[in-house]
Amino acid sequence: MVDEITARAYPISMTNTKYADISGLGHIADDYDALLVDIWGVIHNGRVAFPDAVAALERFRRDRGPVVLISNSPRPGIAIPAQFDEIGVPHTLYDAIVTSGDATIDELARRAPGPAFKLGPERDDGLYENLEMNFTDLDAAKFIACTGLFDDEVETPDDYTEILAQARALALPLVCANPDIRVMRGDKMIYCGGALALKYEDMGGEVIYAGKPHKPIYRLARSWLLEVSGYTIDTSRILVIGDNVHTDLLGAQNQGYPSLFVASGLDGGNATPIKSLLEKHGIMVNYMLPSLAW
């Protein structure tokens, strides 16, 4: 279920909620010409792919139209297929992949070469490959490039209090490549870059976001849809599918897209408390499923 940290990160104060339970994506597929689909929690859990979700997206792509995957991963989209190969996600279910990393590259390019303090694990270094960044110690940096925690298997945001306090004293802006607060890796909850960004904001620091629910990543996704479809698809005919209320669904709502809430991810699979949550916060959702299937 959405926790207090996530709710504070993305507050919502809208009314007139309306949503419908459906039997599967096939029940509404004819109403849409394209999909923008979250990855982690909808297609896989970081360890294994979800076969029903894979089959549903392959069928939509074959019968209806393009599928663009849209993720808050801090890695560039070109790095995601290799990750898919490791966990058994086929390449036949999507036309393009857009990540928060892709959208963040533009923000970093305007600030390159820095100098910058690099905050995050080495596995995310592909984000910087073509940017000629000059990384340095915190006290010599002009900004922080944050993809996540150094070791998200064991660390929490509390381990970064001292670093972030020093950065705040230096008035360094933090460019966050992954706005997600937490995700499930297998059966374990881990913190993401968004948790550090939120902590920094709470300390009075400046944070720059590009991923969901913020506009840059959706602008990039629309560019890819135009590229693969050859025409401009009306917003009302593009369905956003996601499992996170305060990134996927808020992003869809803010950008005017209809949305399908997959309720088995971070927000749990029990429909009753989830519906109460949506009503409490006034979150607009068009459809709900316990997991993505046709």
Image: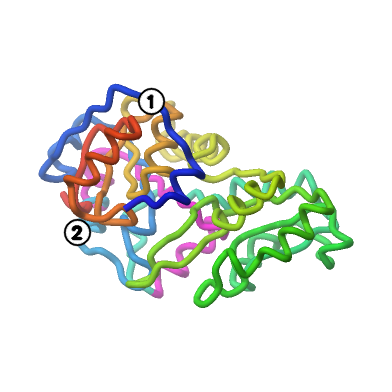
Disc 1 target residue: 14
The kind of residue on which mark 1 rests is Met
Give the residue at x 64% y 47%: 201
Label 1 packing within 10 angstroms: few (<14), some (14-19), many (20+): few
Judge whether residue 68 is colored magenta. yes
Q: How is the image coloured?
A: rainbow
> Which stretch did the figure color magenta?
58-86
SS for dot 1: loop
Give the left or right position of residue 81, taking residue 161 as reference.
Answer: left
The kind of residue on which mark 2 rests is Asp
Q: Nearer the viewer, residue 53 or 272?
A: 272
Give the left or right position of residue 274, taking residue 229 as reference.
Answer: left
Give the left or right position of residue 172, taking residue 47 as reference.
Answer: right
Q: Nearer the viewer, residue 154 or 141?
A: 154
Give the residue at x 25% y 32%: 286
Whether residue 96 can be seen here: no
Residue 7 lies in quadrant: top left
Whether residue 230 can be seen here: yes
Residue farthest along the right direction in this orientation = 140
